[in-house]
Image (tube, rainbow, N blue to C red):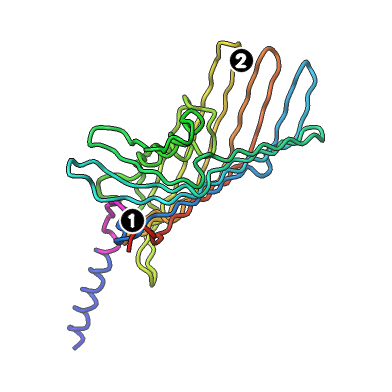
Amino acid sequence: MMRSHSILSALVFAAFCSTASAGIVFGPVRGKAGESVRLVTHSDTAGGTISKTVAGKTSTGTILITRDRDLVWTFRDPAADGTRRGMVKVDKISTSTKTVIDGHTENLDDKSPLVGKMFAMSKSLKGDWKFELDGSVPMVRVQKEIDELKIYLNRDWYPAREVNLGESWEFDPAWIKMIVERDFPKAQTIGTMRLRQIRHTLFGKSALIEVSIRSTGAGFHSDGSEDGGSVELTGQIVVNLQTMLDESLELKGTITTDTRKRGDTTSTKVPVHLVARKSFVRNPAFP
């Protein structure tokens, strides 16, 4: 009896060790028929500071930038020639900036003309993503928003191979950087992820991934101005391993910028907090 118990314990222990050491292969999102993916993001720079020097006089103050996104993505079956197809519904794309310098307050609010619209998107096997707008919005006005949507669709964050606990890999954080800061298109950016933990709950398994992003850039312009800055962010992603949906992303860090032109300077240092949530929603276009 004791020997049988020992054998059973050994088998259980071996199975546990095998499961604990097994790696993960991240794959495409597995949604159910009729489901779409809702993406909600919020970022802000609460506690940001700004300093301006003009004609030898220095002024200081605070700056708060808030960006919000609320989008619903619906992907259709590929066309016969392999073209990927889908729809995107824009419920919110907005940016607000509040600057207070020497007691003077300036508020700027930018709401995208894409808000409230739904439009088709497609990508051929060898082409880029295309968005079929209805012509009611000037493309020049929404080009940055369209570029942001393309970068989101093209993101490739996880290795195609098996990943083990504690393992790190590099990724391209272009979409994240575009949300938190748009002023450094030529910046050198390094993004790394590390598989920190596999969580087991009543609702299934999820992967906890540590994220680190560092970016620095500088530029010189024909008008004699020059600028530079840096982005440093750290945080985590939680991926549902049943559906492969990255259900949450949270990053915190700091952005610094410096601009000089003919002796005048502007410097900012802002804490950044970015939160992104994803969930499956029922698409009313489906029965």
| Helix, strand or loop under label 2 | loop
Find the magenta span and give its range: 19-29
| Residue 284 in the figure: left or right of residue 19 | right
3D distance between C-alphas at marks 1 and 2: 46 Å
Name which residue type carries label 1: Met
Q: Residue at x 61, y 32 (%)?
A: 256
Q: Nearer the viewer, residue 276 or 8?
A: 276
Crowding at mark 1 (Cα within 10 Å: few <14, some 14-19, many 20+): some
Task: Please name the predominant secondary structure of the magenta segment in the image.
Answer: loop
- Residue 27 lies, in percent from the top left, at 28, 51
Q: Is residue 143 above or below residue 92?
A: above
What SS does tag 1 mark? loop
Compared with 94, 39 (above or below) is below
| Quadrant holding the C terminus | bottom left
Q: How many marks?
A: 2
Q: Which mark is residue 244?
A: 1
Write the residue at 35% across / 64% down. 205
Q: Which residue is drawn at the image coordinates 42% and 58% (left, top)?
A: 279
Farthest residue in the right direction?
103
Residue 140: x %, y % from top left: 48, 28
Marked residue nearer the N-terminal end (1 or 2): 2
- In the rendered image, which quarter is residue 175 located in? top left
Residue drawn at x 26%, y 71% as measured from the top left:
13
Amino acid type indicated by mark 2: Ser
Judging by the rendered image, the residue that carries numbered circle 2 is: 225
Callout 2 environment at 10 Å: few (<14), some (14 to 19), or many (20+)? some
Which quarter shows the N terminus?
bottom left
Drawn side of residue 174 relative to residue 14, left or right: right
Please identify the quarter of the rendering in which residue 102 is found.
Answer: top right
